Structures are given as structure tokens and as C-alpha cells.
Image (cartoon, rainbow, N blue to C red):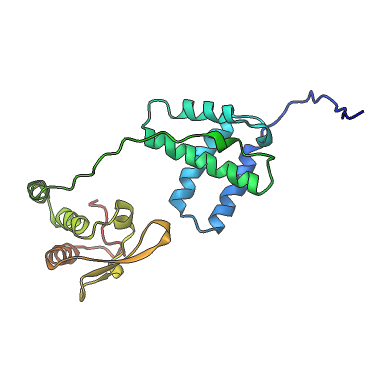
């Protein structure tokens, strides 16, 4: 009376985390996440599936805590926070899709990071970088990064056709697939033109390997 009788499961229990990860990443790709972001999720979550071999619906917060502790030992707090964010996002999605009864990652907390001021290069430091450049490619790269403030990933993705030398502007697609226009001065334009004149390849990228 007022009880349910269930049979005891004695068979080997197999984890299903990995198949849920594959589904999650496919859904996120459809949502427009970048390849680099998807890779970060994949590497973290695959480690999770290897660490916790049990049905995803039975994973609890202590399982996740042990995973994060073992995975981030000796790493920076910012790295630990990134891994925690990937895990929380995954389990939040599982709950929203009703693939698990309750999100065990809700109680996971981010590590507080020390607030540090970022310091820009001084005029002397920038000049030292310029003097250390060995060729036109390095000088153009230094001037380009300093003038535009582009992220390294954005510089890598920049093609020659993205530049408008008539207006000294550059069309950039940055984080979150957001578009913006950045400007650069005549000095940067001069060094870019000198670099491009000596290029002997047909690669569309603005900066190619020195090899």
C-alpha cells in the first residue's frame, strides 16, 4: 500500500554520456556556434564521458565536482571556470530537453578571479617590437595588430579582399559571428602594401606562414 516494488538491476550499467554529447554538439552547430567553440565543448565533454561511466540521468553534483577537480588540477582559475561553464551549459540543455530529470550542475560554482588591470604597450615597448622585426611581413603584422586591435583569431581569418585601401578600413567577423568595421592609418597601409608586393603566392589570406 503506497509503495512501488521494482526489480533490482544487476546487469552491467553502461554510460550514455557520449551519445548525448554528440546530439548536443549537433544542436549547437545548428544554433550557429563557431567551430572553435564547438571544439572546446567537445574536448571537455569527451573527457567527462570517459571520467564518469554511468547513465547521464544518474550523474550527481559530486560526480561533476570530482571531474572538474581532477581535470583542472594545477591549471589557472580561468581555465577551471571555462570547463565549469561547458559542463553547466551541457547539463542545462539536457534538463531543458527533458533528457534528465534534474540538472546536477546547478550547484557548481565559478572560482572568483582576481581583478587585474590590463596595461597597454608603452611607446618604447612598441618601438622595440618594430626594431625587432626581421622582414616586411613581421613589421606589417605588428603595425596591423597595433592599429586595428584585432584578436589573433581575427587576424588569422582576415583575407586580402577584406581590406579597403581607399578608405583604410577592414571588414572583420569576430566573436559570436558579429561583424564590425575597423580602421588603420596610412603608416599601417604602407607596411601592408610593402609586404603584399613581395608575396609570391596566390593565397587569399592576408598573413601567410613565412615558410
Q: Residue 81 placed where, x, y %?
A: 43, 37
- In the rendered image of this protein, does residue 199 appear above or below residue 77? below
Count the labels in the image: 0
Asked which quadrant contains residue 171, the reply is bottom left
Q: Is residue 113 above or below residue 191?
A: above
Q: Position of residue 37 (x, y in %)?
A: 45, 49
Q: Is residue 169 left or right of residue 86?
A: left
Q: Which residue shows up at 42% across the image and 61% down it?
A: 177
Question: Quick one: 203 or 186, which is closer to the camera?
Answer: 186
**1 or 111, which is in the foreground?**
1
Q: Residue at x 30, y 38 (%)?
A: 115
Is 191 placed left or right of 28 in the picture? Answer: left
What percent of the width, then of the height, locates residue 99? 68, 44
Residue farthest to the right? Answer: 1
Q: Is residue 54 above or below residue 157?
A: above
Quadrant the N terminus occupies: top right
- Relative horizontal placement of residue 122, taking residue 176 as reference (left or right): left
Q: Name the residue: 59% across, 41% down.
A: 91
Left or right of 122 in this view: 61:
right
- Answer with the quarter of the image where residue 82 lies: top left
Q: Residue furthest bottom?
A: 166
Q: Residue at x 54, y 55 (%)?
A: 29
Amino acid at each position: 500500500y503506497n509503495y512501488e516494488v521494482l526489480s533490482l538491476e544487476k546487469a552491467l550499467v553502461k554510460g550514455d554520456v557520449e551519445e548525448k554529447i554528440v546530439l548536443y554538439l549537433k544542436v549547437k552547430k545548428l544554433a550557429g556556434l563557431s567551430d572553435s567553440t564547438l571544439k572546446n565543448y567537445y574536448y571537455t565533454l569527451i573527457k567527462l564521458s570517459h571520467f564518469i561511466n554511468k547513465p547521464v540521468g544518474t550523474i550527481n553534483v559530486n560526480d561533476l565536482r570530482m571531474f572538474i577537480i581532477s581535470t583542472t588540477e594545477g591549471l589557472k582559475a580561468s581555465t577551471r571556470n571555462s570547463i565549469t561553464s561547458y559542463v553547466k551549459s551541457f547539463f542545462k540543455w539536457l534538463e531543458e530537453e527533458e533528457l534528465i530529470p534534474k540538472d546536477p550542475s546547478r550547484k557548481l560554482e565559478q572560482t572568483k578571479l582576481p581583478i587585474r588591470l590590463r596595461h597597454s604597450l608603452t611607446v618604447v615597448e612598441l618601438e622595440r617590437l618594430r626594431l625587432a622585426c626581421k622582414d616586411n611581413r613581421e613589421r606589417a603584422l605588428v603595425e596591423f595588430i597595433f592599429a586595428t586591435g584585432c584578436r589573433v583569431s581575427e587576424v588569422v581569418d582576415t583575407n586580402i579582399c577584406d581590406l579597403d585601401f581607399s578608405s583604410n578600413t577592414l571588414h572583420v567577423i569576430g566573436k559570436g559571428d558579429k561583424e564590425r568595421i575597423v580602421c588603420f592609418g596610412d603608416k599601417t597601409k604602407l607596411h601592408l602594401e610593402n609586404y603584399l608586393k613581395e608575396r609570391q603566392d596566390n593565397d587569399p589570406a592576408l598573413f601567410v606562414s613565412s615558410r
